[in-house]
Image (cartoon, rainbow, N blue to C red):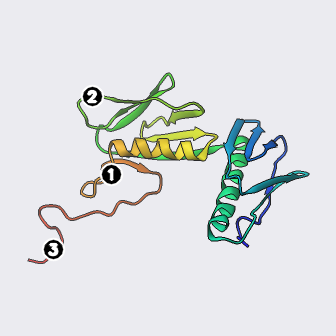
């Protein structure tokens, strides 16, 4: 039995789930999320918990069991407390600002780059204009938006300039001079 799949998903106070066959809708204080799960996986609600079961012990059913439970748990967490992804901007003259709902990035290009948020995602920038916070209910969408912003100017290994995830360490390389290289 899948260790992740067999764990029940508790529903916090104020969160409700509606199960319609393989379609599950979760409502909470931060909004509503819906997802269609594989028809072989059965999702049932007992009091304030959701349980995920699989029909057989086949390899594909075992894989879907843990995946479905993890996706369901992320839906419940998203509508109750939400998800955040923090990006850090490194480099001289590199900065970010929020104009309306859009994120405007100055990353050393000849023009500013404007990023429009998908529905349910909000951007915020701290007062130093170097820390960008992406906030939303859907973990998948928040992570995808963060990856797209990072892809605009990925961190380079020589000076460490670019957009990186908070806490990410960039492996630095010796430059052309070969500092620390044998002669």
Residue 89: percent from left, percent from top: 38, 44
Which quadrant of the structure image shows residue 178? bottom left
- Horizontal side of residue 92 vs 85, given as left or right: left
**Disc 2: which residue:** 111
Nearest to the observer: residue 43 or residue 133: 43
Nearest to the observer: residue 16 or residue 155: 16
Residue 155: percent from left, percent from top: 32, 51
Image: 7 above or below 110: below
Q: Earlier in the sequence, mark 2 or mark 3?
A: 2
Q: Are marks 1 and 2 in contact (CB under 8 Å)?
A: no
Quarter containing the C terminus: bottom left
Dot 3: element:
loop
Q: CA distance from mark 3 to mark 1?
A: 23 Å
Answer few, some or many: residues within 10 Å of disc 1's Cα (few below 14, many 20 plus, some between 14 and 19): many
**Disc 1: which residue:** 155
- Horizontal side of residue 56 vs 84, given as left or right: right
Q: Earlier in the sequence, mark 1 or mark 2?
A: 2
Q: CA distance from mark 2 to mark 3?
A: 38 Å
**Disc 3: which residue:** 181
């Amino acid at each position: 039995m899948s260790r992740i799949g067999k764990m029940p998903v508790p529903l916090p106070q104020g969160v409700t789930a509606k199960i319609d066959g393989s379609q599950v809708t979760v409502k909470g204080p931060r909004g509503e999320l819906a997802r269609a799960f594989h028809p072989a996986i059965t999702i049932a609600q007992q009091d304030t918990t959701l349980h995920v079961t699989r029909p057989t012990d086949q390899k594909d059913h075992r894989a879907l069991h843990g995946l479905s439970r993890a996706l369901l748990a992320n839906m419940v967490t998203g509508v109750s407390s939400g998800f955040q992804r923090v990006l850090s901007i490194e480099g001289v003259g590199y900065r970010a600002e929020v104009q309306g709902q859009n994120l405007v990035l100055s990353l050393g290009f000849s023009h500013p780059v404007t990023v429009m948020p998908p529905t349910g995602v909000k951007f915020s920038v701290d007062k130093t204009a170097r820390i960008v916070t992406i906030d939303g209910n859907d973990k998948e969408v928040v992570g995808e938006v963060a990856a797209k912003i990072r892809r605009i100017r990925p961190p380079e290994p020589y000076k460490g300039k670019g957009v990186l995830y908070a806490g990410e360490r960039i492996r630095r390389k010796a430059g052309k001079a070969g500092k620390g290289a044998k002669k």
